[in-house]
Amino acid sequence: MHKLFAKQLAKATRGGKRVDLALLGELVASAYEQSDRDRRRTDRSISLMIEELDKLNRSLELQVEERTAALRERESELKAQNFRFDAALSNMSQALLLFDASAHLVISNQRYMDMYDLPAELVKPGVALVDLLNERKVRGSFQGNPEEYVAKILADVAEGKTGSQIAELPDGRTTFVLYHPIPGGGWVSTHEDITERRRAETQIAYMARHDSLTELPNRLSFRERLAEAFVSLQRDERRAVLYLDLDRFKNVNDTLGHHIGDELLKVVASRLRSCVRESDMVARVGGDEFAIIQMHIEQPIDTETLARRVCSAIKAPYEIDGHEMVVDTCIGIAIAPDDGAEPNEILRNADMALYGAKADGPGTYRFFEPKMDARMRARRELEIALRKAFAAGQFELHYQPFLNLRDGTIPGVEALLRWNHPERGMIPPAEFIPVAEEIGLIFPLGEWVLRQACADAACWPDNTSVAVNLSPTQVMSKSLVPVVISALAAAGLPAHRLELEITESVLMHNTESTLATLHRLKQLGVKISMDDFGTGYSSLSYLRSFPFDKIKIDRCFISGLPNGDSAAIVQAVAGLAKNLNMVTTAEGVETQQQLDEVRKLGCTELQGYFFSRPCPARDILAMFPRRLEKPAITALAS
Amino acid sequence: MRTEQLSWSKPTGWHNGSTSPLNGSTSPRNANLVLYFGAREALASGSRYHELRAMFPDAHIMGCSTGGQISNDDVTDDEIFAAALSFDHTPLRLASAPAPDAAHSHACGEAIGRALAADDLAGVFVLSDGLNINGSKLVAGITSIIGNAVPLTGGLAGDGARFEETLVGGDCPPKNHAVTAVGFYGSAIRIGHGTAGGWDEFGPRRSVTRSVGNVLYELDGEPALDLYERYLGEDEAKGLPGTGLLFPLLVRDPARPQTALVRTILAVDREARSLTFAGDVPQGWVAQLMRGNFDRLAAGSADAARQARAGLGGETTGDEVALLVSCIGRRLLMGQRTSDEVEAAGMELGAGMPRLGFYSYGEISPHATSGVCELHNQTMTVTTLAEVAG
C-alpha cells in the first residue's frame, strides 16, 4: 500500500476501528489536489524557464553580435594602426629595435638589417641579442665582446638608465647607438649612421680654422697657436712672429683679375710653407697678409735667415695661366718674450715693425725696435693734435715779403703756414705738413690757407700779390681749380694777384693731368712759380714743360755766394729766366753781400731774413705803401 | 540525561505517552530544561506555560509558536509537543532579550551572548521571534560574543502560514518581540548538529540590482515581486508570502561562489513590489530561484540527522534527544507528505532517540562546510543532545 495512503487511512481510523470515509476522502482528495498543484507549478516553472532562457539566449546572441562587430572594427583599426606603424618603422632613417627584459628581440625594422647586412632569417622576433652581435662580429660590423656588451645594457636598463655610444665600425662608418629602457623591463635602441654628419662636422671645424683658398690656417687658428706658443714658452726660449704682406698684389688683382690673384695667393702660400719647418706655422691672416710663427730659435740669426728666405721665395717670378708676374713683400718681425709679454703686444709690435719695413721699401724686413714704438706714438699724437688744431684755429699765416731788386718795392709776399701749438709752441711746417698729407688733412688745410691768403691780400695795395705753396697732392687733386676760384671770389681778389708755388716733384707723377690743372690755373690769370729750383733731378726739363711765371732759386745756391760755381749757376739761371720772360727770386738772402751779388747776377727779386722775416698779416700792412729808395735799402741793412 | 516526551491537545490536555493524563495533581517532576512548541493560538493565553511551570517547578522552560510541531514521526498543527530533559552533570543558564525590530537584531544577539558567555560554555540553543528579527544579524551578534567554536543552534518561531505574529518565551509566558536562549556548560554535554537542504536551483542567474538588508526590491532591474507572481501563477500568488516559500532564493557572492545561502520570504510589500527575506540578500550578489524535489528533501533530512548523530560520538550514557528545526517552506511544499522527511531523519537517528521539533521561519546552525553559524532557510537542521558519564 502506498505509504501516504496508509497514513491517511491511519489518520481516518484514529480512535476506533471504523474508517471515517469522509475524512479519508478529504485527505485523499487533498493529496490529489496538492499533486495537481505541484504538477502545474512544475509545468509553469519549466515554461517560464524556457522562455527566460530563450530571452537570455537572444540577448546573449545580440551581445555577441555587437561584441563581434566591435571587435571587427577594432581589428581593422588595429590593422590600419599596424600598417601605419609598419610604414613609419620601415621608412624611418634610423634602425630601430625593441628587446624584452631577457634581451630577446621583439621588434626590428628593415633599416637595421640593411645597415648591418644581416639576413632576414636571423633577425626574427625571439632571437637573442647576443646572437645578432655574434653575426655582426663575423660580418665585421661589431667589435668587442658580445656577452659583455649585452650584460652592460641589461645592467643599465635594470637601473632605468639611458645609454648611448658612438661606434667607429671597422668598415669606416660611424654610428650612434642609443638605448632607452621601457616600462616592463625591455628597451628600445636606435642606430643612426652619422658618418656623413661626422664628416660634415669635421669639415666645418676645419673650415672654421683654415683659409679655404690657400688651405693655410686662418686668423683664428693663428691667434690660438700664438697663445699656445706663449703658454709653452720656457725660460731662455724664444719664438718669433713674422708679419708680412704682399707688395703690388693689388696691382695683380686689378690688372689680371681676381682669378689670377687667387692663384697667386695659392702659390705664395705654398712657397711660404716650403720656407718654414714642421713645427712652425704659416697662416693667412688677411687679404694679402700672412703671418709666421717660428717656434724654435737656436740662434738669433735663425729668424733673420728665415726672413731672408721668405723674401727671396716671394720675390721669385710667378707664372700663372700663361701670365708672368712678380710681387714683393715687406716683413715685420717681433721676438717673444723680448718684444712682448703676451700675444696682443707681440702682434702690435710686429705690425709696427712691418710698417717700418714698408718705409724702407719693398723686399725688406725689419725687426721691431722699442724706439719705433715711441716714434709711432709721437706721430699718432701729432696726428691727433693736427686734427684738433685745425678745428681749434691754431693755424696762422705768416708772410715773408719779396723785394724787387730794380725798384726796391715789395711786389708781393709768400704765405707761410704756422702752427701755434698751445704746449709745444710754434711747430715748423716741415714737421707737420707730411703728416697732414698722410692723414688727408692737407686738403682742408690747403683750402683754408688759400682763402686766408686771398682774404689778407685783398687788404693790401692793388699791385701786391700773395704766393701760396702747393703740395703735389693738392696739385693732383681735381678740386684744386674750383677751390682757387672760390677763394679768389670770396676774397674779391683778382687772379693775377695770386701766385702758386710748386716744386718740381709735382711734375713727376701724373704729368698730363697735372699740366692740365696748371694750364687751367694759368688761364684764370693765376701765376705759377717753380720753387726750390735746382734741387731736383731735371729742373731744366720741367721748365720746358710748362710756362712758369717765376723761378725761385733755391737757397743752397745763394748761401754759397760769392763762390764761383754758385755765382755761375745763379747767373745762368737768371739769364735763362730773363730769356723765357720769367721772374727770378733768390731765396734765403741773409747778408748784404749776398744781396749785392744777386743783384749783380741779374735776379729780379730776393727773399730772405736780411730783408724781412716772415711776419703776421698786420705787420705786412705796415710795410706798405712805401716805395723804398735805394738808400732806404741800405738804411734797412744797418 | 533523561528525556520525557509530552504532548498537549485540546480535548485531552497534557500527555506523556502513557494513558493517564498529566495534570496539576501529579507531583512535581525533576527536569532542568523543558522545551515546548505549538500553534500560536494554543500558546497565546500563556496557560500552557503555567501548566508546564506547575509540572516542572525547577526547570528552565522555553518554547515558541510554530508552523507545525514534530514529535517522533508525527507532524501536527493543533497539538503542542514538549520534552522535559534532566541533565545530570550539565549546568544550564537561560537568557532572554527583547527584539523590538530587525534593526536591533545584532544588539539583541550581543545581549544574549554576553548573558551566556563563560569559559565552559559548551553550546547554545536559541529561539527567536520570527518576524521582527534579522536572523543573520541575530546570529552574528551572538557569535560575536561567544565565538565560532561554541555550537549555536536553534530557530525562528513561526505562525503557520499566516506570518502575522510569533511568540517566544523563556521562563515566562510566550510573547512577541522576544528572543530566548539556553546555554549548556561543562564537559559532560555532547552536542551534535547537522543541516541540509534538498532544494535545487533552476533557471537563469539573476543579479540583485536593488536591495536593502533583507528587503529585496529588484532582480535584474525588474521588481522582485513581479518575478514571484509570474512563477506562482495567479492563484498561488494570492497566497504570498506563504506561497513564496515554494520558491526559495539561492544567493551567492559572485566573488566567493562557495558561500551559497538559501533565503526564504517572510513578507511582501505589494506597493513597493518588494520581498522581505529571513536573512540578508546583499546588493550585487547573484540569485537563482529554487524548487523542491520531494525525494531530495527527504534525503536532505536524513543527511542532517546523520551529521547530528555523528556529532554525538559513541560514548554517551543515558537518553539522547534530537531537536529538529525544519523550515515551513518544506512543509508547505510537501503537504501531507511532510512526515516523509521526519521519518527519514528518524531512520538515521535510530528508533531509540526521541525527536522533538517544529517548523520555523528560519533555522540556526553551523554551516555544513564552513562551520560558521548562520541563519539558514528551507533546511532541516537537527541538534542532538546527550551526556557522557561524569
Image (tube, helix red, strand yellow):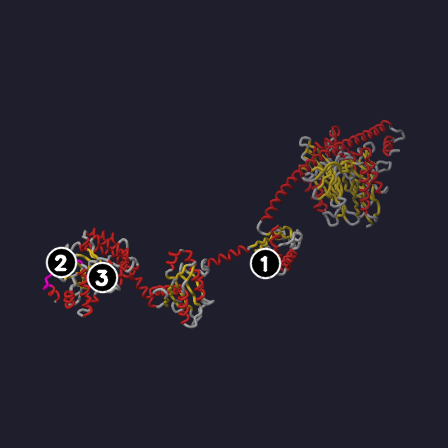
The mark nearer the N terminus, 1 or 2, is 1
Q: Residues within 10 Å of mark 3 (few under 14, many from 20)?
A: many
Residue denoted by label 1: A171
Output the chain of dot 3.
A
Residue denoted by label 2: A624
Q: Amino acid at mark 1?
A: Asp
Between the residue at mark 1 and the residue at mark 2, the CA separation in whole angstroms equals 102 Å
Position above or below: A342 against B198: below
Decide if residue A517 is on the left or right side of residue B211: left
Tell me the quarter of the picture where residue A441 sits.
bottom left
For this rendering, which residue is in front, A635 or B279? A635
Output the chain of dot 1.
A
A617 in the magenta segment: yes
Residue A531, label in figure = 3
For this rendering, which residue is in front, B294 or B40? B294
Estimate the x, y position of residue B299 in percent, counting from the top left.
82, 40
Q: Element under label 3? A: strand
**Nearer to us: label 1 or label 3:** 3
Decide if residue A48 is on the left or right side of residue A539: right
User: Which residues are drawn in magenta?
Assistant: A614-632
B346 in the magenta segment: no
Estimate the x, y position of residue B97 in percent, counting from the top left.
70, 41
Output the chain of dot 2.
A
Label 2 close to label 3 by CB (< 8 Å)? no
**Nearer to us: label 2 or label 3:** 3
Q: Residues within 10 Å of mark 1 (few under 14, many from 20)?
A: few
The mark nearer the N terminus, 2 or 3, is 3
Q: Residues within 10 Å of mark 2 (few under 14, many from 20)?
A: some
Position above or below: B387 against B297: below
